[in-house]
Image (tube, coloured by chain):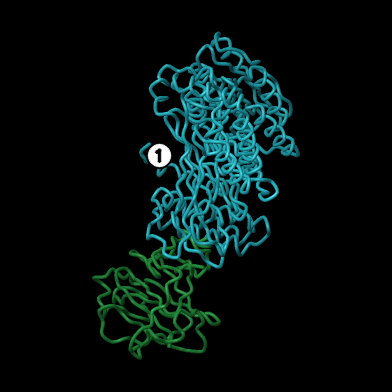
Amino acid sequence: MALEFDPYGVLGVSNTAGAEEIKAAYRRLARRLHPDVNSNPGAGVQFQDVTAAYEVLLDPIRRKMVDDEMLRRASVDDFYFTLRVTPSKRSITPLPEPQVLYLLAEIFPDPRAQDSSSKRETRLNLTLVLDHSNSMAGVRLEKVKIAAYQIIDNLSPDDILSVVTFNDRADVIIPATTVRDKPALKARVSMMLASGGTEIFHGLSKGVEQNRQFLGPKLVNHVILLTDGHTFGDQDKCIDLAVKATKDGISISAMGLGNDWNDKFLDELASRTGGNSLFISSANSVVKFLNEQVRNLTNAFADRVKLAIAPDPDVQLELAFKLAPHPQPLEIGGSTIPLGNLQANRHIAILLQVQLPGGMDIGFRSIVRLVASGDILQQMPQQKFQTASDLNLEVTTDPSREDPPSVIMDALSKLTLYRLQEKAQEALERGDVAEATRRLENLATRLLAIGQEDLANEALAEARRVAHTADLSDKGRKTLKYQTRHLLLPAVEERPE
Amino acid sequence: MRNCPYCGTKNREGTLFCEECGQALISGVDPTMPTKQLEDMPNDLAARATWGTASFGRQSAIIIHIRDLPDPITLQVTDRTVVGRADTTSPRQPDFDLTPYGALEKGVSRMHATIERSDDTLTLVDMGSANGTHLNGQRLIPDQPRVLRDGDEIRFGKLVAHIYFK
């Protein structure tokens, strides 16, 4: 039978549990996750799974089928991934007012995956959507072509590639095809000429359409959008398209080249699908960035990884940010957060900030339940896998003295800088110039304190500019945003896996 | 609530970095711990009620305690008081000369910083000094004014001073 999850694991009971125990476990979870008590979209998704697991286990015939399937799996030693949740503290003092707790959620690939990844089994279904508007003329377009040639060279013959170019209109210059005749594919790329304006929607929709033709659960389906310009009036259509693409299992990465593009829009586009957004400041870096992106894709152990977050009804999720493998802000509005692919040799790390209520009772209590799911690619016949982690903490008037884990402190110290520039931009959008200036000055001070002098000067220059013109420069806005985000990288990578 | 020691913003308990200024909020003090009563409070500056205030009313002087110096110095503040190290070869001399307190060995610049007076506050501005000015451990960005509060610690190069409003 097709088994998408382990019902025992979902309910948190052993496989010898009796009906009473199963009912009690179900009731315990339902009290936290039922839509009547928990309006959180993540809780709704989890409640469906919990209910499905409960129904399966209470039906003797279906339970027998599950047991047989689990037994078979245990014998073939399937691949899996693990979810680990670390809180900023394990015991909490009850306070009359709300308090903040940070959680680090990490998804680790199966340790055995790294050995087997040497013989690559992951197939790629890659679509490049490339801007060839007038502003791309010259060195930018040349570099994009070089990057495309290298990508074609590095793909294996069984991978699928499609290339769409766009300006005011979109053309499919390579319809989705296997990468067998490399010289012919390169020849088509070489015909690209710069002309016209930038309208992303046409290009993106043609790109997604090409990608859909070979859409499959065994493939990494990914669209890379590269642009250097603002698109006009079609942003909402693009986001809608991205949301639909995610449902089909396609992730989108967005790369902005130069200073004249909409970072907020590309960020949202990528975050909604589990992809990355990148700022490429000079044309010379295009080749490196594009190749790196594709290399990461070919290294995928699992794809369409998603996280469903269900805080308890009285707990509030305030912030989610992907720290690794690539720093990216996440949208917390939906029922699940798409995270894209999980690489065989790097884990996914997400920092969550939640608010705990005032006046908590003494004793152990549940805080949040996380469920990670995804398609494991290096594995047949099983495809889907999911794993849950339930965080419980002790509320006590005598909490143990502990420093927050250094990984959380590290990540948070850098994330705070990113948040400062974000808040400055939010203040500007509200028209609060004084606040924006103050935030940028604070950012400059903090950057100076950690030895980032160039970036501190940039922040200071922008603070002055804001005070006078009430706006950031296009370059400054992107530099501050992507460089402070970039600060998160080394601290994360140095960590032992 | 936890007050940020740097900017004074109230942050919710559990917050690790100030939401306003990004400074680390050092934990260690239990929020529920009762305030400790100080015994035999000496009648010195530490116990004054104005501690921590940024409001500098009609006073005309501040008291400066230089570390390792037994007696405090009273400084009359004008609209703009330049702090530095007097040097006969330089064309301008500071209003407040730190030479008697080891300014040269401690790396104080000739024109190190200014204390400026506006309506009812004092601000400290680093003048691009070689070894920098630190306010409560935080290095100042040159030409960026910072408000001074009663009890603040200022470091000119390696020379440490505490200031109190009179």
Amino acid type assigned to the residue bearing label 1 in the image: Glu
Q: Position of residue B116 (x, y in %)?
A: 47, 77
Q: Is residue A266 visible?
A: no
In the picture, which chain is cyan?
A
Q: Is residue A163 left or right of residue B97?
A: right
Check disc 1 and report the residue beneath it.
A493
Q: Position of residue A373 (x, y in %)?
A: 56, 33
Q: Residue at x 63, y 43 (%)?
A: A42
In the image, residue A432 sits, relative to residue A12, either above or below, namely below
Q: Is residue A255 left or right of residue A408?
A: right
In the image, residue A162 sits, relative to residue B109, either above or below, namely above
Colour for chain B in the figure: green
| Viewer-nearest residue: A421 or A413 | A413
Which secondary structure lies at badge 1?
helix
Q: Position of residue A317 (x, y in %)?
A: 59, 51
Q: Position of residue A350 (x, y in %)?
A: 50, 43
Q: Residue at x 40, y 70 (%)?
A: B135
The quarter of the picture where residue A275 lies is: top right
Q: Residue at x 56, y 32 (%)?
A: A7
> Which residue is the extreme one toward the bottom?
B43
